[in-house]
Amino acid sequence: MKILENIFNVNLYLNKENIDIRNKEPLRDPWVQNYIPELYITSERINKGVADIIEKVLMGNCVCSIIGDFKSGKTYLSKLLAEGFRQSLHEYCSYNKFYVIFLTPDNFPERYSLSNFMRIISQEVLGKYYQSKEKIIVELKKHISEENALLIIFIDNFTKESLLQILSDSLKLTKLLKNHYSCIFSCNRPDYEHCAQSLEQRFASTCTSSFHIPTFDLEQATKLLQTRLNYAYMKSNIEISSIFNSDVIEKAWIYSDGNPWILLALFSDSFGYAKSVGANKVTEKHLDKVRSLFSRKKFIGDLDDGGDKFLIQQALNEFPNRERQVCEYLLYKDATAKEITKHLYGDIKAQEYRTKYMGTKSFIRRLRDKNMIVIKGKRGRALLFGINPNLKAYLQEKKV
């Protein structure tokens, strides 16, 4: 399937059996953080924005931006576009060849530098390694001109300072590789404004397309829950009302301000809490309980840099649902394993409680083995998720 022609119109090909699912266990976790076939971010405005990005990219001298709230789907949209460009962008223009490179902080294990940036491009486009960035530029200009090629680079998930550096270098490339280079970067609004202010006129004259990912409306929030439940129970059209009261969906949407990550977190925790107290349907009572238990801030902790907060939350999202809930609780409150167990599972039988308690206690002890550190802060313990040694050292220095 061609993504550009069918973007955000994916269907779930699941069984259509009609059964009572109120007391049945889901076959798969409906709240997984990995992307599943769903309309995660979709609207007519999204589709028009995608078309505008494509039009500007094909000009060959553009730096485009995808701006969105925390966990709004920026990375998801960028990855879809990158894959779609590789598949069929050639059908929309006169370039003979395309090179699509997707860059994240993982491409720069130590730190970002122009030399490393150019070497990555050299290996992807030229298939050669050059020590000198000047030599790379000379060979690159010659190659893409002879091939009539367009180089497109996606920049995703960088901290604002690293993003500023890489954008500054990208702006230079738009002039050096005129009509043969375009760049698409994704970030939140504060980071975008930081870069725009720092780069001033160069940024304003070259960044010809800025697309803002809209928040969810109530209909989209309901569709998101629908697709998650369809996925979990492996059915084509689950009756949501058999699992969630309708007022729960609207209330969760209001609490989330249309942010899909917060919305899913509310659905996940209220679903789990309802199950723990023996209820076969999620009600407002369950939603209010978990809403007061876990903070729903879009940024975590006292860190100043939004990029670092994003990385920390990304690491947390890799955990299974229950372990993630333990971590979320510890992020905002210095609590014992006993207190956490009681909040997560409610009043349960003594034998079952002991099993749950020992599991929670064991997990907290294993935090260090999961590439985490625990630091005593002003408000209690703070979990710091070490994405890499440099980030961990940086966070420790700040003494959160």
Image: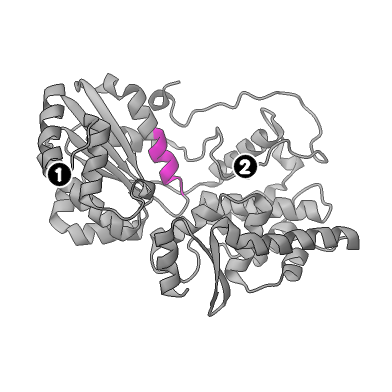
Q: Nearer the viewer, mark 1 or mark 2?
A: 1
Quickly name the residue at label 2: 225
Q: Position of residue 239 (x, y in %)?
A: 72, 35
Which kind of residue does numbered mark 2 sit on? Leu
Name which residue lies at 70% across and 23% down.
15
Amino acid type at circle 1 is Ser
Q: For residue 132, which numbered disc appears in the image? A: 1
Name which residue lies at 39% across and 47% down. 106
Binning the other alpha carbons within 10 Å of mark 2 as few (below 14), some (14 to 19) or many (20 upward) gives many
Identify the residue shown where x is 42% and y is 44%.
75
Main SS, magenta residues: helix
Q: Residue at coordinates 19% horizontally, 52% vertically from top-left? A: 168
Q: Quadrant of residue 241?
A: top right
Residue 366 position, x and y percent, is 64, 60
**Front in this rendered view, residue 123 or 270:** 123
The reply to whether the C-beta atoms of the residues labelled 1 and 2 are less than 8 Å apart is: no
- Numbered range of the magenta stretch: 72-80
Which one is nearer the viewer's eye here, 149 or 238? 149
